[in-house]
Amino acid sequence: MRNRRRRCAAWSATAALAIIRASPGAAAEPLAPAASAPPEAAQPAAASPVLDPASLLLFSVDLDELTLTDGLSAYDAPEDPLLPVGELTRLLEMDVEVLPSERRIIGRLGEARRSLVVDLATGTAKDGPRNVPLAASDVAVTDTEIYIRASALQRLLPLTLQVDPESLALKITATELLPIQGRIQRLARKRDNFEGFQQKDEVLKVETPYRLLSLPAFDMAIGAGIESDNRFPLRYDIRVGADLLYTGFQGYLGSNESGDPSTARFVFERRSVGGGLLGPLKARTIAVGDVFTPGLSLGPRSLGGRGFMLSTVPLDQTNIFNRIDLRGELPLGYDVELYVNDVLRSGQNTPAKGRYEFLNVPLSQGINVVRVVTYGPRGERSENTRIINVGGGVLRRGEATFELGVVQQEEPLLLLQKPLPEERVNPGRGGLRAVVSANYGLTSTLTIAGAAAYLPLDDDDYRQLYTLGARTSLFGFATQLDLAYDSRGSSAVSLGMAGNVFGLSTVLRHAEFQGGFLDENGPGADISRAMLRRSELTFDGNLQFRGQVVPVSVRTLRNEYADGLIDIASSLRASTTASSFLISAGVEYERNITPQQTVQRLNGYFAGSTFRGYKWQLRSTLDFEILPELRARSLAITADRDISETVALRFGVGQALDDVSSFNLTAASIFKLRFADLSINGDYNNADQSWRLGAQLNFGLGYNPALGRYQVTRPGPGSGGSLLFEAFLDKNGNGIFDSDDVAVPNVTLEGAETKIRTGPDGRAFVTGVGAGPTSRILVGLDEVENTQVQAPPSTIQFSPRAGSFTTVRYPMKPTGEVLVSINLRRPDGTLVGLSAAQVRLVGDNGYTAEANTEFDGSANFQNLPIGKYRLELDPDQARRLRMTLVETPTIEIKGDGGFAPDVHAEVKFAPRPAAAASEGEMPAPPTAEPAGQQKSEDSQ
């Protein structure tokens, strides 16, 4: 018996290294390190495909009607993408370990614990004894992940994958019980009664409900000056936002150079990211006032006016064949640049009715990163980033989308000044314009689309237009077919195809027109002429140049008219980084062909920017002409420098290179006050010897509910949302800032214009968070005195809107930490740490924490709520191994920010029953396995 006990003890101290984690909610995985250093990774037999960042796709992953994630990153063809094995198996809690440095995948599958081995160095892929063929194109390896094509991965793992390339959805069907399914079944049988410290999501989602009435918030910009011709310009912009009648109200009032009100716009809008408006219609956007009608693939484009609109289309999704219009607020003195997938597409420095407009912006298939970079007159730089998921327009079966817009064309809700005769360019101005479109997923691979429009031609003439189309996939390419017919007897047909060609996102579209069909959507088209046909070809992708990844965009457009005119326009744009500079360059080619002559032009530009030494922000632009003659046209350079946190300088020069005697100089001094920005600037134009001196004041005015009064702020509350953040130690756990709770100062908030900290009262009022569909604030506790707290997720997500404020209660609960050591006594009396032992702390407050000991027998328990705990072994593991604690220690967590004393516990093993020895077995613990083999307890 003594020898058997000694052998049991020896096995427990060595072979116990093979015990694996099986805590509820965690994937089974080996914890103990290898006994010896791993062998050097073998060299790959063949080069793996290189992942193209431009082919990134974000898939939603569903298992048993449960969404595991909305953002599984995949690459390459959307019909059969390369999937990340490590990320996917972690989602499924499978016992799989991905070793990219060794180009190897190992693990155990199913309740039978079949071995899984993928060794790319030797070209081996086995599920138990079954060999699984893998082609070189099925696998890609990065520094942190191994990707396997979906069609090959379902041959390796006990599951089938249904890929929907149009909606970017991945549906998993398990052919065997997966660990995550087993855990969900167990949790369904046994709920955790202690919910106070269970963090459900990594993101804290806070609602911003619409109110019947809220106090408005304002953004104001006032500028005044003096000019060399003795004029005294005065100009102002006022933006206001508030909640009214359970909608979001936005208003704008702008003046001309004389200080007279000249432009106004107002809109009442309500948005729902999840489509919770108008009951079964599931609308996402409803707006009344100065709104825009939707655009169609053939016929009408998006135009504004006073009226109403509604849409059920997801806010950040679009069709690869559609162009989007981007609009936003552009205050006085600001200029803006548009980047799509890191390629500079356009810029604007003159606001149109107080906002910027980028119209007919094309996108590429998959994920598009759209950045609108705004540069202010005081040297500030801000970015508004949108992630737009572009698919082929195919909806899920039974899914439908709907858009409607009715306006009085190009007429504002409040007309302050009548348009001049030369401004009435569009003969249909003032007429009724109505556009409605609908899409329906007939099957999972076919979507039908229909639309109708009522469009003004002049004061008394209208036309009706109808379209019918289909969206599907042919030969692996997203395909769109549209037919159109109007009441004047004209018609049009359009065919588009999109997909990856030689690693480039490619879109080809061709349209034919008959009877003078009027298509407003043709980029660069002359709608005053009858068009015969239009062709468009675009390429987007990344090129490798001297170790640099260079995003490139190529576009070619051909318009042919009934009078014989042919317009050809092509552009090539690219952006990259060189040293500390962001460089963008492009060329644009135009060719006009008539029966009499051919005219061609080739222009180009270079643009560069840098934040030199994190002190000087430099920007420059060079425009030049290549055809019909080579010449430089203009050069502009601006430099901004922060002298201190409150004072900055700006210098600028503009030079007309075709007339070196003509240049423009500008200089400004900017004072960044606590509640406003004041700039004093001067301009000099050498061409006409004119000069101008001026001053501009920008500030915000918002209601602070914590103070119960209006507060002057930095610009932002009138054009975007605000946030009232409350951080406190929640003693009674009700989630409300009660009188006996303790405020937590120095909690940092990032995501607005500047980094903000909570004050002594634990509160912070944050403005300037924008008005996008969603916004995020990052919470930091590094500067908090007591970091031993259990806090909600550090990422706060909400949906701001102009003039709104969102109250975020951030209750933190005091916690403690303790280090537990599990030891086994050797025959010579010394203690050795026992690895992979499953232990738990059971508190008198109902909270239970579980952990596995590391290689030295230690387990660190963090974020323990206040209370008294007793140390226990996992009963299942203890029963199988006949392992018990010599004594049962108790631990008290005080929650005072300190550490509880370390706890050392000793375990012992009972001998095996005598019946086992009588059968001639070698003395060994029950269910012992050879070292290196693992057995899942999660499936027991």
Image (tube, rainbow, N blue to C red):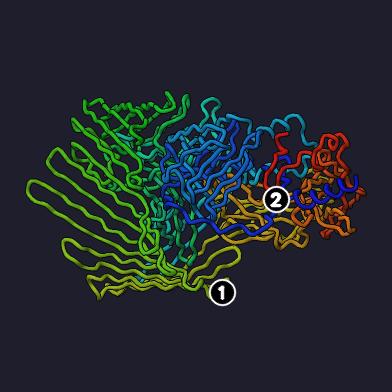
Q: Which mark is residue 644?
A: 1
| Image location of residue 186, percent across then percent down | 73, 32
Crowding near pointer 1: few (<14 within 10 Å), some, many (20+)?
A: few
Q: Amino acid at mark 2?
A: Leu
Marks 1,2: beta carbons within 8 A: no
Left or right, 660 with respect to 638, comes to left
Image quadrant holding the N terminus, namely: top right
| Image location of residue 862, percent across then percent down | 77, 53
For the question of whether residue 694 can be seen, the reply is: no
Q: Residue at the location (43% across, 58% down)?
A: 259
**Residue pushed farthest right?**
887
Left or right, 152 with respect to 929, comes to left
Q: Nearer the viewer, mark 1 or mark 2?
A: 2
| Image location of residue 21, percent across then percent down | 72, 45
Q: Which residue is mark 2?
A: 31
Residue closer to the observer: 255 or 288: 288
**Residue pushed farthest left?**
596
Above or below: residue 346 compared with residue 773: below
Residue 785 found in image quarter: bottom right
Image quadrant holding the C terminus, namely: top right
Left or right, 300 with respect to 206, comes to left
Crowding near pointer 2: few (<14 within 10 Å), some, many (20+)?
A: some
Q: Residue at the location (66% across, 55% down)?
A: 779
Left or right, 795 with respect to 518, comes to right
Earlier-in-chain disc, 1 versus 2:
2
